[in-house]
């Protein structure tokens, strides 16, 4: 339990259902959907649709999603809603045109949006309500306007200059060429019209016909290689989750091209250390976490990519022999130097989770990659495009090298834990680009090593080793910073917070749902 004399949030409790999202309007709509008879999948899609309107800096229908769906008494299913690369944008194209880097605002950074198809296919498999019902609130917020919340207003202002670089984006996502202010209202009529069509026609309304033509034309006008065939070819992948045991539970993650497998590696490595004499905010805890991150990111950045284009053997990589090789690179009294762990980009995202009255659980993550994606908008349909293509490498032979209709190595990962009876006990996720696997490991340790509640586990201060720096939040004490520096860590104090997070614990003994939502975001957990 949190110390009452300290600032913070209490855990949210409910008997029937629980939602946790990064935005109050989204959480409210998810709960509304549950109360009118929808299940967790319906609520997650509706919440995501609302977020695509009210948090345009982090997500949108121009982006991707991944999800884990665990219907009660069924096995976990991983849903890959990440977008493919345009067919004509292969490595030869970039060589021929002397392009040696995919920049953040380039049309070549725009992969085909995958989220809408994933929402539609998930609903076909698991949903209860009419698909159209799930878009009513999102359309209304886009058409009539929504109040801009604090954190979103801050990031909107921070990216104002970026949004001015594209003629259409400047008109659609700014007010008189300025970011909307906190508590002001913002609307996007073009997006409202598109959401209405998606609700009525499903995925076809987005990937075929006038909306697809508009998106292709808008990208082609800027030099993109996108075709209507690329949009038509986009598909969602349903698979089993990748699982590994942890304590008395089983961790579930989506397979690559997401980096969820890194959570498995991190937890196996972290279990090799003795945590009985290490505090949750101990220098040694953050040092070990940083070193584990480096060796795991070496692996991530050297072998992971779209499995349709390269080999991936999960069981072999999870072998005790391989884990020990990784563990032997870590020292408790010095810093591991690694150039192979450097990443191509460090984007943002949103995460939400839902548990309904039947204990069906959805762990769901949506993103347009960097803040406000590519900054490129479609002319007539209100779609702001992601720039997930910046995650590709232009290195021949690399598993994450760009290719036709290939999916880039992602950063977004939903998480879920089950018990020995194959029942969900925790649905959770952490936002923050490349921080996500570290954040998930951090939360799991906070709960299972340090005895924290879900809200405490999300609240606690964070550090993140990336590209030769140890990024830390301002809440770190001077003595802790000094101790970490003395070991050889190059400290970088973050102006903003590191990531965000949501989680729902299912207390099956008491029949109670426990929700937590990160105060680093605008959102909240709420149940009934």
Image: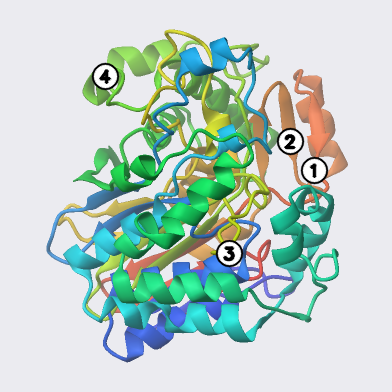
Residue for point 64% across, 44% down: 374
| Residue 471 disc label | 2
At mark 3, the secondary structure is loop
Point out the tag, 1 or 3, that comes first from the N-terminus. 3
| Residue 382 disc label | 3
Residue that sits furthest to the top in the current view: 397
Q: Nearer the viewer, mark 4 or mark 2?
A: 2
Does the image show residue 525? no
Q: Are marks 4 and 1 in contact (CB under 8 Å)?
A: no
Mark pair 1, 3: CA separation: 33 Å
Residue named by callout 4: 319
Does the image show residue 359? yes
- Residue 196: give x, y in percent of width and height: 43, 77
Query: For this rendering, which residue is in front, 141 or 321?
Result: 141
Q: Are marks 2 and 1 in contact (CB under 8 Å)?
A: yes
Point out the tag, 4 or 2, that comes first from the N-terminus. 4
Other-residue count near label 4 (Cα within 10 Å), few / some / many at <14 / 14–19 / ≥20: few
Mark pair 4, 1: CA separation: 36 Å
Other-residue count near label 3 (Cα within 10 Å), few / some / many at <14 / 14–19 / ≥20: many
Query: For this rendering, which residue is in front, 5 or 342?
Result: 342
């Amino acid at each position: 339990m949190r110390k009452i004399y300290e600032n913070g949030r209490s855990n949210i409790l409910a008997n029937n259902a629980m939602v946790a999202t990064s935005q109050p309007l989204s959480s409210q709509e998810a709960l509304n959907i549950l109360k009118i008879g929808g299940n967790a999948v319906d609520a997650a899609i509706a919440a995501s649709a609302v977020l695509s309107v009210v948090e345009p800096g982090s997500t949108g229908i121009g982006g991707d999603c991944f999800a884990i769906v665990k219907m009660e008494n069924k096995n976990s299913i991983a849903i890959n809603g990440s977008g493919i690369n345009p067919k004509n944008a292969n490595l030869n194209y970039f060589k021929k045109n002397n392009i040696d880097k995919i920049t953040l605002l380039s049309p070549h950074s725009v992969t085909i949006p995958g989220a809408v198809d994933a929402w539609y296919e998930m609903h076909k498999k698991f949903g209860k309500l009419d698909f159209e019902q799930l878009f009513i609130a999102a359309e209304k917020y886009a058409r009539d306007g929504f109040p801009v919340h604090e954190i979103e207003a801050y990031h909107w202002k921070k990216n104002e200059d970026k949004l001015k670089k594209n003629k259409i984006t400047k008109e659609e996502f700014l007010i008189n060429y300025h970011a909307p202010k906190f508590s002001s209202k913002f609307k996007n009529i073009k997006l409202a019209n598109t959401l209405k069509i998606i609700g009525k026609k499903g995925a076809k309304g987005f990937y075929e016909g006038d909306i697809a033509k508009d998106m292709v034309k808008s990208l082609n006008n800027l030099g993109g290689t996108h075709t209507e065939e690329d949009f038509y070819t986009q598909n969602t992948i349903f698979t089993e989750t990748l699982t590994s045991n942890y304590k008395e539970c089983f961790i579930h993650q989506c397979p690559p091209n997401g980096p969820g497998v890194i959570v498995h590696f991190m937890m196996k490595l972290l279990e090799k250390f003795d945590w009985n004499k290490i505090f949750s905010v101990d220098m040694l805890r953050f040092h070990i976490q940083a070193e584990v991150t480096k060796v795991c990111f070496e692996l991530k950045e050297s072998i992971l990519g779209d499995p349709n284009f390269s080999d991936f053997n999960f069981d072999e990589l999870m072998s005790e022999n391989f884990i020990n090789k990784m563990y032997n690179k870590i020292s408790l009294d010095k810093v591991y130097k690694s150039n192979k762990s450097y990443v191509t980009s460090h984007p943002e995202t949103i995460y939400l989770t839902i548990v309904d009255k039947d204990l069906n659980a959805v762990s769901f993550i949506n993103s347009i990659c960097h803040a406000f994606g590519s900054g490129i908008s479609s002319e007539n349909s209100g779609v702001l495009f992601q720039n997930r293509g910046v995650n590709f490498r232009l290195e021949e032979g690399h598993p994450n090298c760009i290719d036709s209709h290939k999916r880039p190595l992602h950063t977004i990962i939903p998480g879920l834990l089950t018990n020995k009876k194959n029942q969900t006990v925790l649905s959770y996720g952490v936002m923050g680009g490349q921080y996500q696997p570290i954040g998930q490991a951090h939360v799991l340790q906070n709960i299972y090593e340090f005895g924290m509640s879900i809200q405490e586990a999300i609240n606690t201060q964070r550090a993140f080793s990336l590209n030769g720096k140890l990024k830390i939040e301002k809440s770190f004490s001077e003595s802790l910073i000094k101790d970490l520096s003395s070991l050889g860590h190059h400290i970088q104090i973050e102006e903003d917070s590191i990531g965000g997070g949501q989680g729902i614990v299912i207390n099956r003994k008491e029949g109670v749902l426990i929700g937590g939502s990160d105060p680093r975001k605008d959102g909240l957990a709420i149940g009934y």
